[in-house]
């Protein structure tokens, strides 16, 4: 082989190697972005440690397939079925009110996808007395016809009422320690939700909803509530100016919200979404709660304050109207056409370990 030929072969090999190297770099770059977009993101708690949580690919959220055979009323873009309420946020997340969606259409989209929904509920100390109604009414109204796994966290497992559940639905009791401070019970929920997702749910469930136990279902709560990050508007403040929202107002707290800031005031008693989104929320709120505790601060409304701070920055992708968490002591307002889930009237002095 001539010297020229040698030179040519050498150059060709170098070019091929260079192209392969570039392809390798391109591949790892694309894969990293794909993985972080579809799977769980790396969550870095404030202490600098890293807890990587991976989740299975969630296809259905991105791709909605309707049945060709279902007949339903034509939707309109000029005549809304609800003109008395606002049905979209300024960041274009739907606000779910009765009359804004077609339940049959939504169910027909989600049923073939075989989605599964986890629900967490805490019944610590005397709050076990609310479990029976909560569980029985959930059977009647909460994601009926779908795979549902309810996790009951309690320090009194023997008091968990046995409820007859439909096929595909199940209940697991998770023992937790009691506490002599209700504030701690309420706030510790974030940590326990985070651990549940990490240890039991990832790769098994798609969505999760975290609900207060001292409540009952009265109407459908189903596929219309699904979204990546789902918040419920608090029934007590939805007509108020944001200056009246009971946000944490002390600068020193990680839950601080400045005057003049805030979208809506959300409930601590109901929130949810995709597992990885709720994991991120729970991890952040728990980390911030602990950072506050080190400074001797407890936010005005415990984890509800941290949740409100989180949702101000991480906007919910779906917002549920106060139909999804009313309070029995409040007369129903006309724009609330249906009450789906509502807090029962309770005597705090009777049921809480401290007042
Ligand atoms: C509001 C919120 C609640 C929480 C709290 C502030 C709504 C409707 N409720 O309710 O979610 O943000 O403010 O911390 O938005 N629990 C027990 N045992 C106890 C005390 C509490 O199991 O001794 C659990 C139980 O699941 C209960 C939840 O914690 O539903 C919240 O406690 P709460 O209902 O007493 O709090 P409340 O009514 O102030």
Image (cartoon, rainbow, N blue to C red):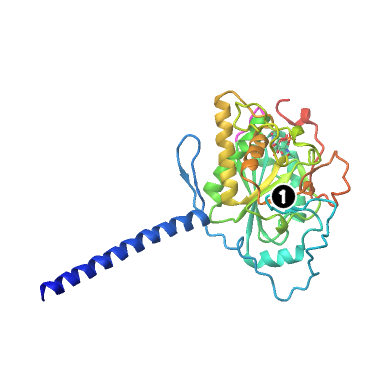
Q: Where is residue 185 drawn, in percent x and y?
A: 65, 33
Q: Is residue 312 left or right of residue 131?
A: left
* Quadrant in which the C terminus appears: top right
Residue 258 falls in image quadrant:
top right
Q: Where is residue 31 drawn, in percent x and y?
A: 43, 59
Which residue is depicted at the point 67% across and 64% down? 110
Question: Where is 281 relative to 220, above or below?
Answer: above
Q: Considering depth in this image, is 137 or 321 the residue closer to the camera?
A: 321
On the question of residue 119 being in view, the answer is no
Q: Where is residue 292 drawn, in percent x and y?
A: 58, 28
According to the picture, the residue beneath numbered tag 1 turns out to be: 89
Q: Secondary structure at mark 1?
A: loop
The range drawn in magenta is: 177-181
Q: Quadrant of ligand 1?
A: top right
Which residue is depicted at the point 65% across and 69% down? 65
Q: Is residue 252 magenta?
A: no
Which residue is depicted at the point 31% across and 65% down? 19
Q: Residue furthest top?
A: 296
Q: Is residue 240 left or right of residue 257?
A: right
Q: Is residue 193 left or right of residue 12?
A: right
Q: Mark 1: few, some, or many residues within 10 Å (few <14, many ≥20)?
A: some
Q: Considering depth in this image, is 247 or 26 the residue closer to the camera?
A: 26
């Amino acid at each position: 082989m001539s010297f020229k030929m040698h030179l040519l072969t050498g150059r060709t090999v170098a070019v091929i190697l260079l192209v392969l190297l570039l392809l390798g770099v391109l591949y790892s770059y694309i894969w990293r972005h794909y993985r972080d977009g579809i799977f769980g993101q790396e969550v870095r708690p404030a202490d600098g440690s890293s807890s990587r949580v991976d989740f299975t690919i969630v296809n259905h959220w991105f791709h909605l397939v309707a049945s060709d055979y279902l007949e339903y009323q034509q939707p309109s873009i000029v005549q809304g079925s609800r003109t008395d309420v606002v049905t979209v946020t300024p960041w274009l997340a739907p606000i779910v009110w009765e009359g804004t969606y077609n339940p049959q259409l939504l169910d027909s989209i989600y049923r073939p996808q075989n989605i599964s929904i986890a629900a967490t509920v805490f019944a610590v100390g005397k709050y076990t007395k609310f479990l029976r109604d909560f569980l029985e009414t959930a059977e009647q109204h909460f994601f009926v016809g779908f795979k549902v796994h309810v996790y009951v966290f309690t320090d009194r497992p023997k008091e968990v009422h046995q409820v007859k559940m439909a096929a595909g639905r199940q209940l697991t009791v998770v023992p937790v320690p009691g506490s002599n401070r209700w504030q701690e019970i309420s706030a510790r929920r974030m940590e326990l939700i985070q651990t549940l997702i990490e240890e039991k749910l990832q790769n098994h469930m798609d969505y999760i909803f975290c609900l207060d136990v001292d409540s009952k279902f009265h109407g459908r709560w189903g596929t219309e509530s699904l979204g990546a990050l789902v918040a419920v508007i608090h029934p007590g403040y939805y007509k108020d100016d944001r200056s009246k929202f009971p946000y944490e107002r002390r600068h020193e707290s990680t839950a601080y919200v400045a005057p003049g800031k805030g979208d809506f005031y959300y409930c601590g008693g109901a929130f949810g979404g995709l597992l990885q989104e709720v994991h991120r929320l729970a991890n952040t709120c728990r980390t911030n709660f602990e950072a506050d505790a080190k400074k001797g601060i407890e936010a005005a409304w415990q984890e509800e304050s941290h949740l409100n701070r989180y949702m101000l920055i991480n906007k919910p992708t779906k917002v549920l109207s106060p139909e999804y968490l009313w309070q029995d002591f409040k007369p129903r307002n006309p724009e609330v056409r249906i009450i789906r889930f509502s807090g029962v009237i309770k005597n705090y002095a009777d049921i809480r370990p401290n007042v």
